[in-house]
Image: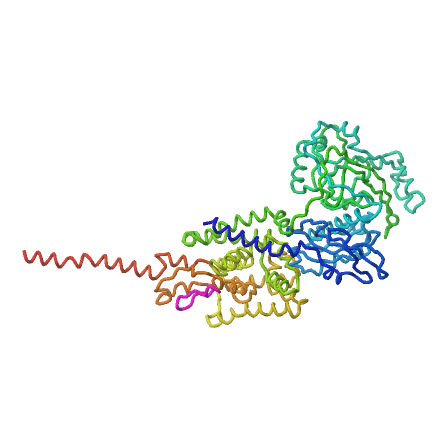
């Protein structure tokens, strides 16, 4: 039965993906692009089949290029699919504008909103692709003196904006390599695992695979001579022949080279890293001089503030791999770290590239002025260690999204398929478990952690509103395509509509609903009084969720700019998407509903939730009445009605499936001979009749005796 349920679930999910895949894969038309061009520029003509267009100035002459990042640099975002942005680049490689087209980063879709994301993108205007742009703030209170240009990130969304930054730069570099003079272009390469050689450190040095840069204190002094920083390093002046920099660099991408440099423990750490970051090229740096590679304020797993790199006139993004370094005997000792360079941004380790170490000096006491000098080391790794690959064929976005979240989807499937099977043919067995409540709470805890906080699969009315606007021409269906994890939850919820009504999602798969249920049990443990509105008020309050849904739909179409604020009626963004890491008033709002749950069972779900209203409407697709009933249900027996915390059972015993959360309490009562009143009465009747049989036979025996 599990396999039978799996097929419609998977089919429903893929139907949703396929329905919108063409919308995202197709290039933007001229009509769609022209309104996005910033005056005084105008859209020219397509210059290739990758979605790159020429950009014209007010006089009609070529002024640059305009392109989307999605087709050129489909780097997966946190949701598993690329962030698509429109980039305007002038002929010199300077950003004219960067705009957001489509994305599904959970922190922005159902958390912070898009405003901080768009503000982040505004920082690119006027910057050049030749500048070493990094996301984050400079180290230290007064800056590090690095030549890096820092773009302010977005709090709680660091990973998403860094992915967006890498996508922008990768796409811009791709256009620059193809269209701008003086910038090289090459076929992408990857380390060839078949290139197996027995190497050691001495051989690496002899073959130029490990290279060294030595700079004395005197050479640094000479570089700063004639500047205000000439006398700001007394240690260098005191010992000019001592080494300021004794830098070794070796590319660890080829397995043969990595084995020659790292010991077994270091090699194992590197392999674990590459299993996750397969497109990163690891670079080992060792410095035995005073330089130290990074400043004292450096933070691991970020960009090194004393190192820069460039290839073909474009900067390379260096980033700390945050790996322990343990080398083989014979490898030089010193300050060591492993950096990583993303090959997806166009880096080719088989071509010359330059690593720069920066010497930084500060002049002055109160507000010191910093100055830097570069010392470069040209590096390249022999091509025999690599294999060239054809330009990767871009997968359709829905397939790319699935590929990048395949493990999350597998984990979700391992939750959904047993749950569907258990709630289907094994439902009565589940409801009749002696320890049903602990089992249910364990499932709900998994839903909070896996579906909610880890997978970011909390369904939201925001998705529904976006879909409605897209269907009426006011938005893009790409928002659905970008999040296969949530789509699988949606598919399960829609399958639940047909089989059970709203109960599958609202009762078993909603993370915030699960939080409220835990709050209810906490209230019982604390022995707090329980209050639920009387039946007539319960019926009136339940209309509130439908009013909330209607209001949100009206706002989405009449005041679309306010829809995001209106959707804050859902506390899901605060409690699930951001894990309560938001402004205090949002946290207070979400906490208030959970606090109410201590005394009133699932008040938000029953009375306010607009998504719950939608689920109730979807439940009209239900094909059967799946809760077993008896003729005595409702008359005379009222036990299930009294025990139903959702108020989903009427006096007649009829189930209001639009309010049923599939908690299975009434199913357990129905099959329990010690609680179901009709079963208890039937058992008593059988017992009474059994006791009456001997007394009915006794007079006949006395009669026979008297006759005798």
- Residue 352, by quadrant, is top right
- Mark yes or no: residue 115 visible: yes
What quarter of the picture does the C terminus occupy? bottom left
- Residue 699 location, x and y as percent? 13, 59
- Residue 686, by quadrant, is bottom left
| Dominant secondary structure, magenta | loop
Determine whether, in the image, residue 500 is placed left or right of residue 383.
left
Magenta stretch holds residue 521? no
Viewer-side residue, 262 vs 482:
482
State the residue at coordinates (69%, 49%): 75
Viewer-side residue, 672 vs 405:
405
Residue 175 position (above or below residue 548): above
Residue 219 position (above or below residue 697): above
State the residue at coordinates (34%, 56%): 673
Determine whether, in the image, residue 262 is placed left or right of residue 432.
right
Q: Which residues are magenta?
A: 646-658
**Residue ranking furthest to the right:** 226
Magenta stretch holds residue 647? yes
**Residue ranking furthest to the left:** 708
Determine whether, in the image, residue 577 is placed left or right of residue 652.
right
């Amino acid at each position: 039965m599990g396999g039978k349920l799996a097929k419609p679930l998977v089919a429903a999910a893929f139907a949703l993906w396929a329905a919108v895949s063409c919308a995202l894969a197709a290039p933007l038309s001229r009509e769609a692009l022209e309104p996005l061009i910033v005056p005084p520029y105008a859209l020219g003509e397509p210059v290739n089949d990758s979605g790159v267009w020429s950009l014209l100035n007010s006089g009609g002459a070529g002024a640059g290029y305009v392109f989307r990042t999605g087709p050129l640099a489909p780097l997966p975002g946190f949701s598993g699919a690329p962030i698509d942005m429109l980039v305007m680049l002038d002929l010199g490689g300077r950003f004219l504008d960067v705009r957001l087209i489509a994305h599904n980063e959970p922190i922005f879709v159902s958390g912070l909103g898009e405003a901080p994301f768009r503000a982040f993108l505004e920082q690119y205007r006027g910057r050049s692709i030749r500048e070493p742009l990094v996301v984050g703030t400079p180290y230290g209170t007064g800056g590090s003196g690095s030549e890096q240009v820092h773009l302010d990130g977005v709090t709680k969304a660091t990973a998403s904006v860094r992915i967006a930054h890498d996508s922008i730069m990768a796409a811009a570099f791709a256009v620059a390599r193809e269209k701008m003079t003086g910038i090289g272009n090459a076929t992408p390469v990857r380390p060839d695992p078949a290139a197996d050689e027995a190497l050691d450190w001495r051989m690496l040095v002899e073959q130029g695979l490990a290279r060294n840069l030595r700079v004395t204190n005197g050479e640094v002094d000479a570089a700063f001579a004639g500047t205000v920083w000439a006398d700001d390093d007394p240690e260098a002046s005191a010992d000019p022949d001592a080494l300021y920099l004794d830098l070794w660099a070796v590319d660890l991408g080829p397995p043969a080279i990595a084995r020659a440099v790292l010991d077994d423990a270091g090699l194992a750490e590197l392999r674990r890293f590459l299993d996750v970051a397969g497109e990163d090229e690891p670079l080992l740096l060792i410095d035995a001089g005073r330089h130290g590679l990074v400043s004292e304020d450096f933070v691991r797993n970020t960009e090194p503030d004393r190192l820069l790199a460039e290839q073909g006139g474009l900067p390379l993004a260096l980033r700390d791999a945050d790996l322990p370094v343990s080398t083989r005997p014979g490898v030089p000792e010193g300050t060591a770290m492993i950096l990583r360079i993303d090959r997806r941004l166009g880096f080719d380790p088989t071509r010359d590239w330059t690593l720069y170490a920066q010497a930084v000096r500060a002049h002055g006491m109160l507000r010191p002025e910093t100055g830097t000098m570069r010392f470069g080391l040209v590096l390249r790794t022999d091509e025999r260690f690599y294999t060239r690959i054809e330009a990767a064929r871009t997968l359709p976005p829905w397939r790319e999204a699935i590929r990048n979240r395949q493990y999350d989807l597998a984990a979700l499937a391992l939750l959904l398929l047993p749950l569907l099977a258990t709630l289907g043919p094994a439902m009565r067995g589940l409801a009749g478990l002696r320890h049903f409540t602990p089992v249910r709470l364990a499932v709900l805890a998994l839903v909070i952690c896996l579906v909610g906080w880890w997978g970011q699969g909390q369904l939201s009315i925001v998705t529904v509103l976006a879909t409605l606007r897209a269907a009426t021409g006011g938005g893009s269906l790409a928002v659905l395509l970008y999040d296969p994890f949530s789509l699988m939850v949606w598919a399960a919820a829609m399958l639940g509509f047909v089989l059970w009504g709203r109960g599958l999602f609202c009762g078993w798969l909603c993370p915030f609903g699960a939080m409220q249920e835990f709050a209810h049990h906490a209230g019982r443990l604390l022995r707090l009084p329980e209050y639920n509105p009387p039946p007539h008020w319960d019926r009136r309050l339940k209309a509130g969720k439908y009013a909330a849904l209607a209001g949100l739909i009206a706002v989405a179409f009449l005041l679309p700019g306010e829809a995001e604020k209106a959707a804050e009626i859902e506390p899901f963004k605060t409690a699930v998407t951001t894990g309560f890491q938001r402004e205090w008033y949002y946290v207070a709002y979400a906490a208030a509903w959970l606090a109410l749950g201590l005394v009133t069972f699932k008040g938000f779900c029953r009375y306010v939730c607009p998504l719950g209203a939608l689920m109730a409407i979807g439940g009209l697709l239900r094909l059967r009445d799946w809760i077993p009933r008896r003729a005595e249900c409702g008359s005379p027996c009222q036990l299930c009605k009294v025990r139903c915390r959702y108020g989903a059972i009427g006096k007649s015993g009829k189930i209001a499936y639009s309010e049923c959360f599939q908690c299975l309490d009434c199913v357990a009562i129905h099959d329990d001979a010690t609680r179901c009143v009709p079963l208890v009465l039937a058992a008593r009747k059988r017992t009474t009749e059994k006791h009456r049989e001997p007394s009915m036979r006794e007079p006949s025996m006395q009669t026979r005796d008297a006759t005798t």
